[in-house]
Image: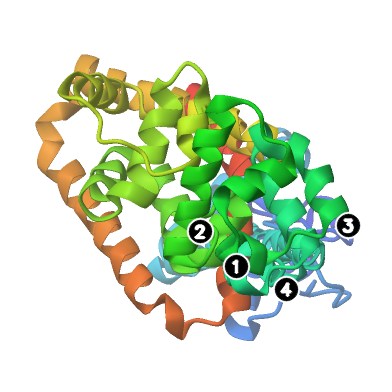
């Protein structure tokens, strides 16, 4: 054969067919490379044994040169190779292995990124958990966990400051050394005189509040952290359930947690005064039929708006947490509106049975977790709780981005 030495394969020593150049610079027939790899299973150059990366490609420049300079010899070589079906099988096996490797590499990178993301999330949640733990001493300093009989003067001052309308009387309680025993055993009128409560509305509410303390022996929760300290399992359930299925969760609160959850939420979101209303300090009255109907209309139509409205009123007792929650509510409201618009205009309602099964499955999963949560370590439950509060906006931003792009 009359052709240049540079166009000869270093493996078969014949004219190059589908010349494939590796990272090291050596070029050989693709069939020769395939045979070598299929036997050795090593990504090594057959000449210098140097490792090569990626999927080797045919060098089109060398192929075009051979096609121009030695067209007849190239045609004869290709016909000879095509006569043996084993050659096609070797190439097919090689291509299959290369394609598998190329698809596996991004997966490895994704798995690595996934675990790095989990580690970063755990670190962030742990920092938030430790901050809240030492800030609140693990919830042990919450008044809801301390019987009124053991309240010190500082606890009474803290209790008065937790009620905005009564914060002006905390200085008198501090000066006179009023403690839990005086609240339980003292005369209500005498307490009003000692605290210098002259406003008639404040007097009535104060008497009702003292009566509530004496009947229950503990303070009812008025902040998110107090509610979590008193109902840890229910708090974890609500923070996830209200995000995934707010309508069903609110219906569940109506039937099972009417006084401690449903009524405060309903009056906070429907009252123009919000949580500042004096009537919210004591036992709430049953709503009228009109109030219930108007509430459920808004709750069914715009549940995340109602949740955001409730969160808005938390700003007076919480610093930064409401802003995380309101961001989540805004993003969830956008996703909820997108879902129902697609359900109507793209006729996805035809698959209503699928969505119903998925909804029921998620509810049952949350209910089962709520039943068995006492078996889980409290640290793990706290991580889930704080993660849902402060990391949910990040995942929702990603969901909104994917939904708008898709």
Point out the tag, 1 or 2, that comes first from the N-terminus. 1
Name the residue beneath numbered marker 4: 43
Q: Which mark is residue 148?
A: 1
* Quarter location, residue 106: bottom right
Residue drawn where x is 45% and y is 43% of the image: 282
Residue drawn where x is 61% and y is 39% of the image: 393
Q: Tell me the mark number nearer the camera, choosing from 1 and 4.
A: 1
Q: Position of residue 61 (x, y in %)?
A: 77, 37
Point out the tag, 3 or 1, that comes first from the N-terminus. 3
Q: Tell me the mark number nearer the camera, choosing from 4 and 3.
A: 4
| Quadrant the N terminus occupies | bottom right
Measure the alpha-carbon separation of dots 1 and 2: 7 Å
Measure the alpha-carbon separation of dots 4 and 3: 14 Å
Image marks 3 and 1: residues in contact by CB distance under 8 Å:
no
Point out the tag, 4 or 3, that comes first from the N-terminus. 3
Image marks 1 and 2: residues in contact by CB distance under 8 Å:
yes
64 on left or right of 147: right
Q: Tell me the mark number nearer the camera, choosing from 2 and 3.
A: 2
Residue drawn where x is 36% and y is 78% of the image: 372
Name the residue beneath numbered marker 2: 213
Q: Residues within 10 Å of mark 3 (few under 14, many from 20)?
A: few
In this orientation, does residue 98 appear?
Answer: no
Image marks 4 and 2: residues in contact by CB distance under 8 Å:
no
Name the residue beneath numbered marker 3: 25
């Amino acid at each position: 054969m009359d052709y240049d030495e540079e166009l000869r394969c270093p493996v078969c020593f014949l004219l190059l067919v589908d010349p494939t150049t590796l990272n090291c610079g050596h070029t050989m027939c693709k069939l020769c490379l395939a045979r070598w790899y299929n036997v050795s299973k090593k990504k090594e150059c057959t000449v210098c044994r140097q490792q090569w990366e990626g999927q080797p490609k045919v060098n089109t420049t060398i192929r075009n040169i051979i096609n121009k300079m030695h067209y007849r010899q190239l045609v004869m070589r290709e016909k000879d190779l095509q006569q043996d079906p084993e050659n096609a099988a070797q190439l097919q096996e090689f291509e299959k292995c290369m394609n598998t490797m190329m698809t596996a590499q991004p997966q490895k990178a994704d798995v690595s990124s996934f675990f790095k993301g989990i580690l970063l999330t755990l670190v962030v949640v742990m920092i938030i958990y430790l901050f809240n733990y030492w800030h609140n001493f693990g919830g042990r300093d919450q008044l809801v966990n301390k019987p009124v009989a053991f309240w010190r003067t500082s606890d009474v001052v803290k209790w008065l400051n937790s009620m905005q309308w009564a914060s002006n009387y905390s200085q008198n309680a501090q000066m006179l050394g009023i403690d839990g025993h005086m609240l339980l055993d003292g005369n209500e009128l005498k307490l009003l005189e000692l605290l210098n409560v002259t406003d008639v509305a404040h007097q009535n509410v104060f008497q009702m509040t003292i009566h509530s303390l004496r009947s229950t022996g503990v303070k009812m929760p008025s902040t998110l952290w107090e509610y979590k300290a008193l109902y840890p399992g229910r708090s974890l359930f609500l923070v996830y359930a209200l995000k995934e299925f707010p309508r069903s969760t609110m219906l569940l609160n109506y039937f099972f947690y009417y006084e401690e959850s449903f009524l405060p939420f309903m009056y906070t979101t429907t009252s123009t005064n919000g949580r500042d209303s004096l009537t919210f300090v004591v036992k709430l009255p049953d709503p009228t039929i009109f109030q219930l109907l108007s509430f459920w209309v808004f709750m069914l139509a715009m549940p995340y708006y109602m949740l955001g409205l409730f969160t808005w009123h938390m700003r007076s007792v919480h610093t930064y947490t409401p802003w995380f929650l309101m961001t989540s509510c805004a993003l969830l409201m956008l996703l909820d509106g997108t879902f129902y618009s697609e359900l109507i205009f793209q006729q996805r309602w035809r698959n209503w049975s699928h969505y119903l099964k998925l909804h029921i499955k998620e509810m049952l999963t949350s209910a089962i977790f709520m039943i068995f949560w006492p078996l889980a370590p409290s640290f793990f439950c706290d991580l889930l709780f704080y993660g849902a509060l402060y990391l949910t906006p990040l995942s929702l931003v990603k969901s909104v981005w994917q939904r708008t792009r898709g």
